[in-house]
Amino acid sequence: MIAYSYIRFSSVEQRKGDSYRRQLEASEKYAQEHGLTLDTSFKLHDLGRSAFDKANVTKGKLGAFLRAIEDGRVPKGAYLLVESLDRLSRAQVLDALTQFTAILTAGVSIVTLSDRQVYSHESVSDNPMQLMVSILIMVRAHEESLTKSDRVGKAWQRKLDEGLKNHKLVTKAVPKWMRVVDGKIELIPERADVIRRIFTMVKNGLSQDTIVRTLNAEMSGWNKAGEWHPSYIQKLTMNHATYGAFETGGKISEGYFPAVISKEEFDYVRSLRSKRRTRGDVGAPGIKRGHGVTNLFSGLVYCGYCGARMQIATNFSKKHNRTDRYLICYGARIGKTDCEIIRWNYRDIEGAFLLQVPYVDLGTVFGGRKSEKLEHLESERAKLLGVLEGAEKKIENLYAAIEEEPLPGLVKRLKDAEAAKIELEKNLALISAELTIERVSGDTGRSRMKMLLMLFKAMKQETDELQLRTIREGQRWFRESGHRVK
């Protein structure tokens, strides 16, 4: 049987200790004693990620493992080896329990190496006390983390209050336009001037893109790449440190840093940004992502001229009261390449892509293999292509007949023929996807192809939410496959 070893600790400092070695050796020893094969393909190591705020799920490898379970890439009967249940979660008990039971329900057993307990769907069902014990462990883990978080938060606030009162340095981590000299924070004059200039440009109505292109043409950015980016301009204009305030845990403490601008100027610029963020739709400034698929090609499409990635840009039309989306070269947008800013209408590109996907033989990307079902699917696809070709010819003939004499009967026949063609195209999409799955070699490839099959099946549904969810799955499949489009 296959086993997966999950190793986690929350503090980066624990790298220097014995935690990693201890957890790894315990997993290897258990696997050897019980005849299990340790799978290393997932590399389930969340080093320096907290289970209290669920970062190991939302940002870490445990979250990727849970998605792999959902996708069927982790076989039933597998084992997940952890030092203790609190390595998986220190979140609130209901959240931790939901995660725990989801793993067991999927047919994956959890082994806690510290006490050699094996939790499975069968064992918990047969012995409810085992579930009760696991819940008590989850409650204790959360309370421990909650107490520690509260204690650390209060200690930090006391240190900050003391620093503000006595003008003492609290942390050497300061914004990039400041430096620490002899235990005191001071402004870097030339960088402070840049901050003031950025705020002035925003007040004058210049867009982030214009500001970025101007700065990139005149000076290097403050990051490792030496580039200015729109996202950094946005962060700067929302950073309370610009007027001297220290922000921690949602609390603003004024007077800690040397101020570059006044609070009145900061508030004015912030109000300007708020006004600009109140219009538009999905993908527009101020609209939260997640209510729709903002960009199906995120991280996949690159400029054919300079190789820079393509990015979604928005333009609000007062005339039509809507926000249009475009794909543009990011290198051109920030002024770091010789490309011109050419806008490609996103809706047109997305529509053309989804229209053509059913006809692409994606199986050739992964290498073909024969199966018992393959010949039947190929035959069915060939038949559908023939029927579709006949339907297209019928529609052409009906159009020609209507041009000569637009009789009501002919118009109705044309509508019926076009509806039949749409249904044929949907069926062809499904057959093509199933055929591709049969051509793919290896279980991993098959499961990835099944994600794309979900996309095609969604095209046959009328529920928008289902379509959005399955399109996201298709997008994730493309990302994991490492495809780039130019």
Image: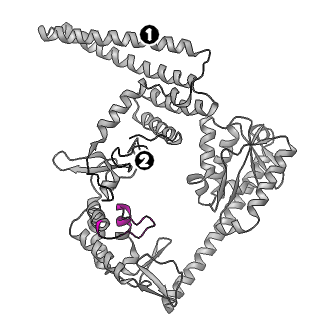
Identify which residue is drawn at 33% across, 31% down.
352
Rounded to the nearest angstrom, the CA distance separating label 1 from label 2 is 40 Å
Dot 1 or dot 2, earlier in sequence: 2
Residue 54 visible somewhere in the drawing? no
Q: Quadrant of residue 215?
A: bottom left
Q: Can you give x and y, in whole percent of width and height, for residue 334 in the image?
A: 32, 59
Which colour style is shown? one colour
Type of amino acid at the residue the image marks with label 1: Lys
Type of amino acid at the residue the image marks with label 2: Gly
Magenta stretch bounds: 217-235
Residue 193, placed above or below residue 439: below
Residue 55, placed above or below residue 343: below
Q: Can you give x and y, in whole percent of width and height, for residue 340 in the image?
A: 25, 51
Q: Can you give x and y, in whole percent of width and height, for residue 357 in the image?
A: 41, 28
Left or right relative to 363: residue 131: right
Residue 240, placed above or below residue 34: below
Q: Dot 2: within a 10 Å radius of its alpha carbon, few (fewer than 14), some, or many (20 or more) residues? A: few
Residue 217 visible somewhere in the drawing? yes
Identify which residue is drawn at 61% across, 18% down.
371
Q: Can you give x and y, in whole percent of width and height, for residue 216 in the image?
A: 32, 65
Identify which residue is drawn at 62% across, 69% down.
149
The residue carrying mark 1 is 383
Left or right relative to 214: residue 103: right
Magenta-span inclusion, residue 224: yes
Q: Residue furthest right?
A: 33
The residue carrying mark 2 is 290
As helix, strand or loop, the secondary structure at mark 1 comes to helix
